[in-house]
Image (spheres, helix red, strand yellow):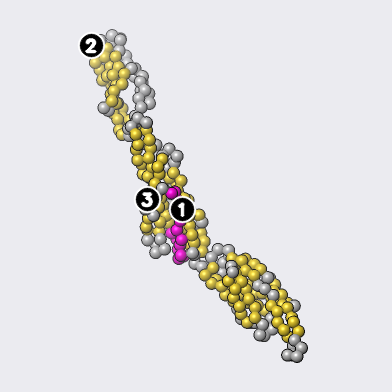
């Protein structure tokens, strides 16, 4: 920072003596670097001949560069159980950052991760609700003149909305009495008799399903005929609560 003097009068041949708190400087328009954070009172003393005069005072406040921190979450919505990854992004002027994540747990109580060097934290919400989180960061700012300074900052809050798990029900039409049909969803197969329904519960996110063809043998015992019933639709994807009717045809 440069300071400027405005001196008039006297007999000429001015001598300039500046005080910056406990520090000093010389010359009419000197530069001075405030390496240590703090508040400084600046004053100029000018000598002309045998006369000494003091200027007015000004106050300078020197601070560390801001430690900026932001927090993101992904995903921020979904059905329980929902696994969320929180990511903290700190300003690059600081080094050796440590992070402490504050978050609402499944009981709705604020808790913390503890200090860690990773800027990521993952938590699984098992219950529906609205949850909030923030992060505290501690970073080191290095000044070659005086060494390291430690700064602490808090991020914005992020909101995570968790919906309850959903269920999905399948029914059939077109199958004769005694036939058995099935639906497979995410590797889980459920069976039911003709006229009965199949329900999947505890679902979250997007789920794919499929229904195979049904083969039965019709006719008298001495003359059974193989009949194949094909489902329509045969596959699909569900993303929330609902129902589906599968029609079977030959």
Q: State the residue lying farthest toward the left.
A: 50
On residue 86, which mark appears?
1
| Residue pictured at 45% horizontal, 56% vertical | 122
Residue 120 appears left or right of 32: right
Marks 1 and 2, the one that precedes in the sequence: 2
Residue 126, magenta (yes or no): yes
Tag on residue 68? none
Q: Position of residue 63 (x, y in %)?
A: 35, 35
- Secondary structure beneath disc 3? loop
Q: Earlier in the sequence, mark 2 or mark 3?
A: 2
Q: Is residue 66 magenta?
A: no
**In the image, is residue 57 above or below residue 214?**
above
In the picture, measured across the screen, residue 35 lies left or right of residue 90, that is: left
Q: Position of residue 49 (x, y in %)?
A: 25, 10
Q: Residue 215 or 3: which is nearer the viewer? A: 215
Residue range (magenta): 118-131
Q: CA distance from mark 3 to mark 1?
A: 14 Å
The residue carrying pointer 3 sits among few (fewer than 14), some (14 to 19) or many (20 or more) residues within 10 Å by Cα, namely some
Q: Quadrant of residue 62?
A: top left
Give the quarter of the image for residue 27.
top left
Residue in the picture at 51% in, 56% down: 75
Residue 138, quarter of the rendered image: top left
What is the secondary structure assignment of the residue under circle 2? Answer: loop
Residue 97: x and y in percent read 40, 44
Disc 2 vs disc 3: Cβ atoms closer than 8 Å? no
Foreground pick, 138 / 51? 138
Determine which residue is flagged by label 2: 50
Q: CA distance from mark 2 to mark 3?
A: 62 Å
Residue at the disc numbered 3: 115
Bin the neighbour count of mark 2 within 10 Å (Cα to Cα): few under 14, some 14-19, many 20 and up: few
The mark that comes first in sequence, 3 or 1, is 1
Q: Secondary structure at mark 1?
A: strand
């Amino acid at each position: 920072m440069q300071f400027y003097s405005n001196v008039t009068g006297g007999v000429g041949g001015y001598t300039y003596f500046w005080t910056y708190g406990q520090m000093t400087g010389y010359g009419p328009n000197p530069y001075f670097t405030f390496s240590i954070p703090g508040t400084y009172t600046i004053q100029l003393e000018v000598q002309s001949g045998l006369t000494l005069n003091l200027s007015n005072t000004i106050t300078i406040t020197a601070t560390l560069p801001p430690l900026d921190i932001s927090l993101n979450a992904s995903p921020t919505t979904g059905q329980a159980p929902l696994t969320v990854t929180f990511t903290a992004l700190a300003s690059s002027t600081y080094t050796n950052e440590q992070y402490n994540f504050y978050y609402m747990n499944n009981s709705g109580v604020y808790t913390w991760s503890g200090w860690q060097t990773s800027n990521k934290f993952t938590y699984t919400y098992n219950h529906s609700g609205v949850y909030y989180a923030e992060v505290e960061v501690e970073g080191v700012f290095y000044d070659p003149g005086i060494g390291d300074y430690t700064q602490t900052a808090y991020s914005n809050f992020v909101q995570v909305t968790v919906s309850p798990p959903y269920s999905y029900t399948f029914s059939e039409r077109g199958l004769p009495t005694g036939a058995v049909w099935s639906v497979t969803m995410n590797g889980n197969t459920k069976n039911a008799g003709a006229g009965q329904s199949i329900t999947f519960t505890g679902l979250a996110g997007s789920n794919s399903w499929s229904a195979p063809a049904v083969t039965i043998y019709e006719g008298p015992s001495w003359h059974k005929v193989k009949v194949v019933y094909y489902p329509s639709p045969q596959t699909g994807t569900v993303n929330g609560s609902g129902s589906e009717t599968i029609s079977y045809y030959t």
